[in-house]
Image (spheres, rainbow, N blue to C red):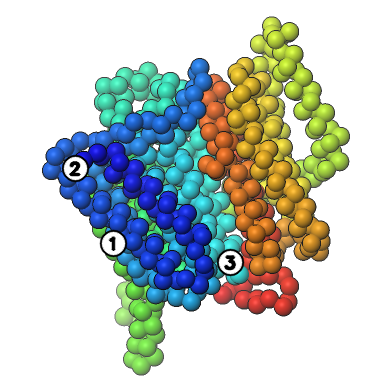
Amino acid sequence: MNANYFILSFIFLPLLAFVISLFINEKQEKLISNITMWSIGTTFFALVGFVGYWLLHEVKSINLKEITIFQSKEYVFVIDFYFDRVSATYLLVGAFISFLIVRYSRYYMHLEAGYRRFFATILFFYFSYNFTVLAGNFETLFVGWEMLGISSFLLIAFYRERYLPVRNAVKVFSVYRIGDIGILLAMWASHHLWHENITFQKLLDYDLVQHILSEYQWTGLFISVCILVAAAAKSAQFPFSAWIPRAMEGPTPSSAIFYGSLSIHFGVFLLIRMMPFLEQQMTARVLIGMVGVLTAIIGYFTSIVQPTIKTQIAYASVSQIGIMFIEIAFGLEELALFHFVGNAFLRTYQLLVSPSVVAYLIREQFYNYKPHNDNKIKFWLSKRIYYGWYLLSLREFNLDAFVGKWIFSVFKRIGNKLNFLTYKNIFNYFFPTYLLGLGLYIGGKYFAKVHQTWFHDVLPILFGTIALLMIMKAFSERRYPRLAWLLVFLGHFWIALAVSHNEYFSAFELVWYLSGIAIAGVTGWYSLEWLKKKEPRLFTLYRYYGHIYEYPRLAGLFFICTLGLMGFPITTTFIGEDLIFSHVHQHQYVLAFLLSSCFVIGGIALIKIYARLFLGSHAKVYHETPLQSS
């Protein structure tokens, strides 16, 4: 029995089913649901057999042979898969719950517009889930991490003809991208800490980790904080808790599989996977415990006052995950795993039966209404404090406004002050400046002595700042979609120039990075040009226009270009991002932050362009237009 083939089948079987589902006619509902159900069901039963055999014979972690994707003299990008008790638990729970959800959805989604799209997205999510769970290093985990974010966006925005699902999908994706800054910076610092693409299996070596942390204590703490930020954003922990009820705009089955049971627990998975590294850092564990305590308190009080059942379940789940963070902080990762299993099954059940419960409660309230008697309530605090706390809980402790004000509004304010970034100024000032920087790079070897003094320190920061300013302008741009697209596109070239001045390396690595950017950027630009000619009056970013209904093929092509330009793992740019970070030195925290912010904010800006042009209720009056509150 070859374990490697079994483990790889858990990844590629859902991927194969996803590809097949794309070519099936929309009207063949039974075939679509059967392919989805049988692929996930087969994976589940194969998992049960494999895990049973594994427990009886080995009970040892399995690290598959690494797959080298790119290699140079100083850098290697490898895909690594790793199977242990954590992977086994998450895989079994994920397969069983996904099978139940698909079984439920084949009837729940019957005759729903987008039936094939829903099941294809579920398959893509399940493939991403297994890929992330089996990841053996940061690079592999980040591939699955990115795919989970996109599948989340697609499922929340499933009712793409409505305003709120699309708007909330963009909001949730934006919070996910903020968490990606943590992953990117953790990957960068980890490369310099270990001087290799460290695998999770090597982290189990207690003596090795202790030796490294004793010499590089602050770098270890920096990586731990970055991991905590990524985990908190993914699992809706403080201060990112407010996105969880916004994610419930999708169909009930997707809410159950994503935000009730599986995706919401990936923050816990990340912390458990990094536990051999975190357990030797008391400061990091205290921070994890504090985040868990705050979230558990906020989640509890928020859940008991919410008016909708989905929001109550969501915050109850968030509160339990906060307790899991506390368990991890105390080193009780096995208890956290057991807690994950129980919470996942409970929230799945609650979300699936929630429509029936609401209908029952409405009938019960209608026929057996009993007025509320305020005299029976005993206040152990003053009524003013009690009612104030109640209102604060009802408003979800203003966490949505807090994140909006201190993160996204900052980007908007900076971007709104950059109105000089117009087509004319880009070509009159920034293009010549770029050529000058390129000339300095090419001629650098002739004045290497000067270059090694202030050029070497100032130019990378300067060019990285220009890239970030361009991308922030794209983030806040509302009038000209093509300008926003162009700014993100050019921002990548400024990033490449900044890193080129930071360290000399092979030009082939820049080609590897910029090739995907060039293809996606140019194709996306011409797609926008074509849409501009067809719809000149409905071509801004002030509102959602829903052009996908009249131009579905163009929308699909532009979505692929959007993924390519943001560095999604469909082009060489994804590997190129890691290549770029490998040339940022260990002490250059400012430059690393600038580059990671460019990638993250640029991705948000691109998704906004796609969503506002192609999703939402159609601007033309002869299409059906749902109410914004639908």
* Mark 3 element type: loop
Question: Which amino acid type corresponds to the residue marked 1 in the rendered image?
Answer: Phe
272 vs 189, left or right, is left
Q: Residue at 64% across / 33% down in the picture?
A: 514
Disc 2 marks a residue whose amino acid type is Trp
Crowd rating for badge 3 (residues with CA inside 10 Å; few <14, some 14–19, many 20+): many
Q: Position of residue 60 (x, y in %)?
A: 20, 36
Left or right, 501 with respect to 152, comes to: right
Tell me the tag on residue 258: none
Residue that appears at 65% across and 38% down: 517
Q: Secondary structure at mark 2?
A: helix
Q: In x, y percent, where is residue 425? A: 84, 38
Question: As rendered, which of 82 and 480 lies closer to the eye?
Answer: 82
- Circle 1 is placed at which residue position? 345
Q: CA distance from mark 1 to mark 2?
A: 24 Å
Q: Which residue is mark 3?
A: 160
What is the tally of numbered marks visible in this picture? Answer: 3
Along the viewing direction, whichever of 489 and 327 lies nearer the viewer: 489
Where residue 499 sits in the image (x, y, percent)? 63, 25
* Residues at marks 3 and 1, CA–CA distance in whole angstroms: 29 Å
> Is the Cβ of the residue at disc 3 closer than 8 Å to that at disc 1?
no
Q: Is residue 416 above or below residue 448?
A: below
Question: Can you give x and y, in whole percent of width and height, for residue 154 in the image?
Answer: 52, 59
- Please name the residue shown 45% across and 71% down the image: 29
Q: Which residue is mark 2?
A: 54
State which tag comes first along the sequence, 3 or 2: 2
Query: In the displayed structure, would residue 528 be above or below residue 506?
Result: below
Secondary element under disc 1, as helix, strand or loop, is: helix
